[in-house]
């Protein structure tokens, strides 16, 4: 279902909160714009002036290495000023509400908030309360959504394997607690992947997961057979209530990606992981660091994808494309 909160009255993307219901053309616009921003990262001076004079606030209420840092680099490459608010050292720790924190930062004439929060719906809540000129990007909310991760995953798959329509993709691990899995499923089905599979013990699969348009497997070797892309996920022990796996050793034996299990996939299948990885639990080091792994390129592409998202939201399509190729707009 289309999330109207994401669009302005002219139908332009105003916030990025979720992939669910995002039109296919919007997804393609982001990926194509990101493609043109890749070259900016390869120049000696890695900057374009698109967001000069704008201020981006990174508001991360949950820990992050990749998302927070690549958003900061992306904003700086667009020439924006960037503020990283540390919630632990902010007035949040004195009881200030999320909306009051945002309102105070808004009063400092900031234009874009990148928000990560442990509560599902936090980015939507903020988006409902900000004035028209302020934009919100969801950098991960609870178990709900991680749209920029899904977009960088699509970008990585397209770069390494070609059109998504021709590909079978397996997502493996803790599907139940994973905002990455949920967003990846919506992104892959929006672009018409040939097949999306989820592989997990039954205790780590959401009920009626097939309604999302995926095929579910509990046997990892069967689920990996013939796939082009494997997306591994971290076991999210911090979100688990009760014993959902019998032991970590047994989980690794059944669902950890090893060289032997990787051989069930196509010989040229790629291996992805959003990070952080738990080596020896969700993935073996030989695979994570092996020739089929594109885990570090995912991180690099995350910069161009996040540049594209901020540029499109704040500058519009023409300006974003112009800036990426160095044209005056
Ligand atoms: N993929 C991802 O969200 O990683 P971080 O938690 O390090 O941002």
Image: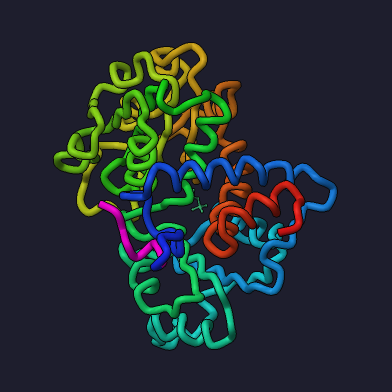
Residue in front for this viewpoint, 255 or 188: 188
Q: Quadrant of the C terminus?
A: bottom right
Name the spot of residue 6 as percent of width and height, x first. 38, 62
Magenta residue span: 1-8
Quarter where residue 191 is shown: top left
Q: Residue at x 54, y 79 (%)?
A: 89
Name the spot of residue 104 as percent of width and height, x first. 50, 87
Q: Main secondary structure of the magenta part?
A: loop
Q: Residue at x 81, y 45 (%)?
A: 43
Quarter where residue 289 is shown: top right
Asked if 315 appears above or below 34 in the picture, the reply is: below
Name the spot of residue 52 as percent of width and height, x first. 71, 69
How many badges with numbers are in the image?
A: 0
What colour-coding does the image apply? rainbow
Q: Residue at x 42, y 33 (%)?
A: 231
Asked if 165 appears above or below 60 in the picture, the reply is: above
On the picture, is 122 further left or further right than 240?
Answer: right
Name the spot of residue 54 as percent of width and height, x first. 65, 72
Is residue 64 covered in magenta? no
Q: Residue furthest right?
A: 44
Asked if 13 appears above or below 31 in the picture, the reply is: below
Residue in front for this viewpoint, 290 or 326: 326
Residue in front for this viewpoint, 162 or 272: 162
Q: Residue at x 32, y 29 (%)?
A: 196
Q: Residue furthest left?
A: 208
On the picture, is 161 further left or further right than 178?
Answer: right
Quarter where residue 65 is shown: bottom right
Asked if 122 appears above or below 257 in the picture, the reply is: below
On the picture, is 132 further left or further right than 183?
Answer: right
């Amino acid at each position: 279902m289309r999330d109207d909160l994401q669009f302005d009255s002219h139908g332009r993307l105003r916030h990025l909160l979720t992939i669910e219901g995002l039109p296919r053309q919007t997804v393609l616009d982001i990926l194509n714009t990101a493609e043109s921003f890749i070259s900016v990262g390869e120049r000696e001076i890695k900057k374009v002036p698109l967001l000069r004079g704008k201020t981006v606030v990174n508001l991360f209420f949950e820990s992050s290495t990749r998302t927070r840092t690549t958003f900061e680099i992306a904003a700086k490459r667009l020439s924006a000023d960037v503020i990283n608010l540390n919630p632990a050292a902010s007035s949040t720790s004195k009881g200030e509400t999320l909306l009051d924190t945002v309102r105070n930062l808004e009063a400092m004439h900031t234009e874009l908030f990148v928000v990560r929060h442990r509560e599902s719906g936090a980015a939507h809540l903020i988006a409902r309360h900000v004035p028209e000129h302020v934009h919100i990007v969801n950098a991960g909310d609870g178990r709900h959504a991680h749209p920029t991760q899904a977009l960088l995953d699509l970008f990585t798959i397209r770069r390494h394997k070609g059109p998504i329509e021709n590909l079978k993709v397996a997502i493996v691990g803790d599907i139940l607690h994973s905002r990455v899995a949920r967003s990846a499923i919506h992104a892959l089905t929006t672009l018409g992947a040939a097949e999306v599979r989820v592989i997990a013990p039954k205790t780590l699969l959401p009920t009626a997961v097939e309604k999302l348009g995926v095929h579910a497997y509990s046997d990892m070797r069967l689920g990996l057979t013939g796939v082009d892309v494997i997306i591994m996920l971290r076991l999210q022990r911090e979100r688990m209530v009760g014993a959902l796996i019998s032991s970590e050793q047994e989980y690794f034996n059944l669902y950890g990606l090893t060289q032997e299990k990787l051989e069930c996939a196509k010989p040229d299948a790629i291996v992805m992981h959003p990070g952080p990885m738990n080596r020896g639990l969700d993935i073996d080091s030989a695979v994570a660091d092996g020739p089929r792994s594109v885990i570090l390129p995912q991180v690099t592409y995350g910069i161009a994808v996040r540049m594209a998202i901020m540029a499109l939201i704040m500058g519009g399509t023409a300006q974003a494309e112009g800036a990426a190729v160095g044209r005056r707009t």
